[in-house]
Image (spheres, rainbow, N blue to C red):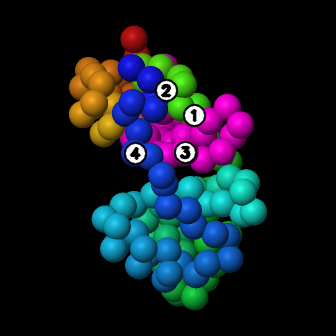
Amino acid sequence: MKVSDAMTPGALIARPDETLQTVARRMAEEDIGFLPVGDQDHLVGTITDRDIVVRAIAQGQNGGALVRDVMTRDVKYCFDDEEMDHVVRNMGDNQVRRLPVVNRNKQLVGVVSLADGALKDSPEMAGIGLHGIVEPNGRAVA
C-alpha cells in the first residue's frame, strides 16, 4: 500500500511565530497531538503535545512561548508514493509515531501515523514499527 492511500490528507500547519497556547488550542479543537511547522512554504519542524509539555511547561515557560522555541527542528518526512511497510519500518528506526507526508516537489500533502498503518494497511507492520519506537536503541525488527 502506498502512503497516499493510508495518510490523512491536508494537514494543518503551525507557524514558528505562533504561541504555544494558540497551537495547543488548535490541537485540542482538532483532537490531534502533532503538527508540521511551516515557514513560507518550507517545512521547518514539527511540534507535538508532548513537546509543549516537556520542552516548555516543564521548563517553566507559559503559553506565550513560541513554537520555534520548542519544536523539533530535525524534520523527518516521507513521500506520498512510498510503500507503507518501508515507511513504518523507518518510523520505528527513527522512533517517531507520525510523519509529515510530502510529494516529490516537497509540498506538504498530509500526515501519516502508525495508527494509519494499522487501520488501513497491516496491523502486523504497525506492530513492527511500534516495537522500534519503544525499544531503547530504536531498531525495528524483521
Q: Along the polypeptide, which appears first: circle 4 or circle 1?
A: 4
The image shows residue 110, relative to residue 67, as above or below, that is: above
Q: Is residue 110 magenta?
A: yes
Amino acid type, callout 2: Val
Q: Secondary structure at mark 2?
A: helix
Q: Secondary structure at mark 4?
A: strand
> Where residue 95 sits: x, y (%)?
48, 38
Structural distance between the alpha carbons of marks 3 and 2? 16 Å
Q: Are marks 4 and 3 in contact (CB under 8 Å)?
A: no
Report crowding for label 2: few under 14, some 14 to 19, many 20 or more residues within 10 A (C-alpha): many
Report crowding for label 4: few under 14, some 14 to 19, many 20 or more residues within 10 A (C-alpha): some
> Where residue 120 sits: x, y (%)?
28, 30
- The residue depicted at 67 percent of the width and 70 percent of the height is 16
According to the picture, the residue beneath numbered tag 1 turns out to be 78
The image shows residue 18, relative to residue 55, as above or below, that is: below
- Apparent side of residue 107 relative to residue 82 in the rendered image (left or right): right
